[in-house]
Image (cartoon, rainbow, N blue to C red):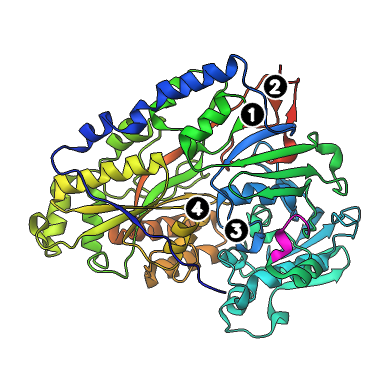
Amino acid sequence: MSKRLRPARRLLSPPSKFDSRTARVFSPATLLLPWLLIAALFFQAGCNSRSSDADLVFVNGAEPQTLDPAHINGQLEGRLAYALFEGLTRRNAQGEVEPGIASSWDISADALTYTFHLRPEARWSNGDPVTAQDFYDSWKRVLEPSTASVYAEILFFIKNAEAYQSGKEKDFKQVGIRVLGSHKLQVQLNSPAPFFPEVISFVTYLPVPRSTVERHGSAWIKPAHMVNNGPFRLLAWKINDRVQLQRNESYWDQARVRLNRIDALSTSQGNTAVNLYLTGQADLLLDKGLIPPQILGELSQRPDFHRFTFLGTYFYRFNTTRAPLNNPLVRKALSAAIDRQRIVENCTRGGEPVARSFTPPGIPGYTPPQGPGFNPDQARAWLAEAGYPEGKNFPRLSILYNSSQAHASIAVEIQAMWKRELGITIDLQAQEWATYLKAMDSLDYDIARSSWVGDYLDANTFLDCFVTGRGNNRTGWSHPDYDQLLAQANLQTDPQQRLQLMARAESILIQEQSPIAPIYFYVGMLCFDANRIGGIEGNLMDDHPMREWFLKKKQP
């Protein structure tokens, strides 16, 4: 795989003669609202003709990096993949798991073996039947070390899957996946996982057509080549503009699909996204990160603004392979010097709860331990103990974030906090989405903004991220006690003991080691006219499958 040249980085120095509050008052983002309102009024006065003949147009977020389920690790790409492919199970508008390609399944008495019965009527878009072999081949492809799937770890619930992906096991026949017939698939697990039917709805478990992948290589995801089994097919992919989806007439449950065409617009700029929505160029604003905080107060008063809670955490990662961030005292000092309440009040402005744990509230039975809150005196003491009293001799580090007004404003605020409370100077480093992801994957950063949305309703979907060697770790951090506690928890059949082991593991992550600094828990935000569009509901998983969407009446 060739390595792309990285664009020149844009470094922003901290303000020297005024604090972040002064910078915020006179920032361009603060002046955004009047221009957005003027633009909206102008288009509504007679220029709101749509540039698309799609039934529904929505703003998805930044330009997708791939539509290959084996390589997807972002929410915006996942939304599109769920429209194109369907797994053994799927989620509905309420975020609940229901049968997908598998019409039913049996579970052994020891809860280690699942036998899935596939629908004979399920078809690929070329008319071929979807078979158990397709899932076998697709999951094998994810686990092949040569595939370098960034999310292969979510298959590690399967017996010997991790050993095969790491190269320790060479024979794939030892992995717990068996084809028992054209429409019968058996899966053996390492340990009981009552949430496994939820897990297999995840994007990495989606099947892909082996013959198409082998014939076209990486180009198989292009519209001219793609074969898929989901409710929509890929009509067009216009880079930095839109992805166009057309109803898939070969889909087994096509009666459920009530839209013929959907366009997903690509933009990483909040002012552009809101303008597209306010002027009628888009019917739905789906990415919560694209609403500029400066106009959130105005938008939230509108009847087409919808708020809900879901399992998502905004946090900062520390690259623990770089000094001085390899010192837990430094990491804890940086975390304790963040005034999270100030950030949610002055930057995000969405009513987000501040986060002192990585795992958000809402997971049944689990109470996460709390890490350090805003405590400047303790932060200064930890930094002095690490050898940097009052910030003296502390090296100049940088905060990495993907280009976004919202991420930039938070970074500016934290930059000022660390200067004010700890006496250290931090630069800001903005990169486009693809470059930003590569920088985190290769640990080419000091401190990076991050977020995590749960893949299933269990604390493991958060805590497993920081097991040694996990593709989503992206901090270089490793702790044997943490790994062992989570391994023991996932072997535990007693639910209460399992939750206790997980809480002990999270206390290491949040209280003792701090390779991350949680900042706030997400609040979901959607903009759409509920009198005109149906099938979209707020839910804990922040999942909004397009097969559920429908129009209640035509747009005037």
Q: CA distance from mark 1 to mark 2?
A: 9 Å
Q: Amino acid at mark 1?
A: Asp
Where residue 433 sits in the image (x, y, percent)? 48, 53
- Residue 538 shown left or right of residue 81 in the figure: left
Q: Residue at x 44, y 60 (%)?
A: 501
* Mark 3 or mark 4: whose residue is earlier in sequence: 3
Q: Amino acid at mark 2?
A: Arg
Q: Residue at x 61, y 50 (%)?
A: 239
**Secondary structure of residue under mark 4:** loop
Q: CA distance from mark 3 to mark 4?
A: 22 Å
Question: Mark 1 touching mark 2, by CB under 8 A?
Answer: yes
Q: CA distance from mark 3 to mark 1?
A: 26 Å
Identify the image quadrant of residue 552: top right
- Kindly identify which residue carries mark 2: 532
Question: Mark 3 touching mark 4, by CB under 8 A?
Answer: no
| Quadrant of the image containing the C terminus | top right
User: Residue 283 got which mark?
Assistant: 1
Question: Mark 3 touching mark 1, by CB under 8 A?
Answer: no
Where residue 462 sits in the image (x, y, percent)? 48, 54
Identify the image quadrant of residue 9: bottom left
* Mark 1 or mark 2: whose residue is earlier in sequence: 1
Say whether residue 288 is visible.
yes
What crowding class fits label 2: few (fewer than 14 Cα within 10 Å), some (14-19), or many (20 or more)? few
User: Residue 459 got which mark?
Assistant: 4
Q: Which residues are magenta?
A: 219-224
- Kindly identify which residue carries mark 3: 72
Q: Nearer the viewer, residue 85 or 369?
A: 85
Q: CA distance from mark 2 to mark 3?
A: 32 Å
